[in-house]
Image (cartoon, rainbow, N blue to C red):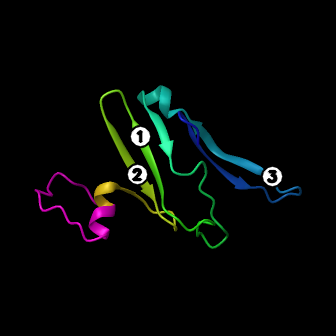
């Protein structure tokens, strides 16, 4: 991840085991006029699907008139701050009809 793009890589299976890009690099800075700021430059998972650093990564998405953030937990679940606060017991009692849930 950089300040304006994100991508996914995987370890290659043929020696030497090098990083291989999976899919295309997404230029979110150009497409959505935002910058990205993260608590970690990369998120790495072991073969079990658990992060090697075992800590939540927060990615701030900053636009010209707004900002928001998403969190990636230790097993790869992506959530916004509202989801995280509900998990921690900080339930927002406002009208929830406008929220979507997965």
How many numbered marks appear? 3
Q: Earlier in the sequence, mark 2 or mark 1?
A: 1
Q: Quadrant of residue 32?
A: top left
Look at the image and give the residue range highlighted in magenta.
84-102
Q: Give SS at disc 3.
A: loop
Q: Give SS at disc 2.
A: strand
- Work out whether residue 102 can be spotted: no
Residue at the (62%, 44%) spot, across then down: 23
Instruction: Using a 10 Å C-alpha cutoff, classify the residue at mark 1 as few (fewer than 14 neighbours), some (14 to 19) or many (20 or more).
Output: many
**Left or right: residue 21 compared with residue 13:** left
Vertically, is 95 above or below 67?
A: below
- Work out whether residue 75 can be spotted: yes
| Residue hosting label 3 | 18
Q: CA distance from mark 2 to mark 1?
A: 8 Å
**Left or right: residue 7 compared with residue 90:** right
Residue at the (62%, 64%) spot, across then down: 45
Q: CA distance from mark 3 to mark 2?
A: 29 Å
The nearer-to-camera label among 3 and 2 is 2
Q: Are marks 2 and 1 in contact (CB under 8 Å)?
A: yes
Q: In the rendering, at what x and y percent does residue 5 appear?
A: 55, 36
Q: Give SS at disc 1.
A: strand
| Residue hosting label 1 | 61
The nearer-to-camera label among 3 and 1 is 1
The C terminus appears in which quarter of the rendering?
bottom left
Q: In the rendering, at what x and y percent does residue 96 appear?
A: 15, 58
């Amino acid at each position: 991840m950089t300040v304006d793009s994100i991508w996914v890589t995987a370890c290659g299976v043929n020696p030497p085991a090098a990083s291989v890009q999976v899919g295309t690099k997404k230029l979110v800075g150009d497409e959505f006029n935002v910058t990205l700021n993260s608590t970690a430059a990369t998120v790495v998972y072991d073969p079990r699907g658990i992060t090697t650093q075992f800590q939540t990564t927060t990615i701030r998405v900053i636009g010209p008139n707004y900002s928001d953030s998403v969190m990636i937990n230790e097993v790869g679940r992506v959530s916004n701050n509202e989801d995280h606060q509900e998990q921690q017991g900080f339930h927002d009692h406002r009208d929830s009809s406008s929220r979507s849930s997965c």
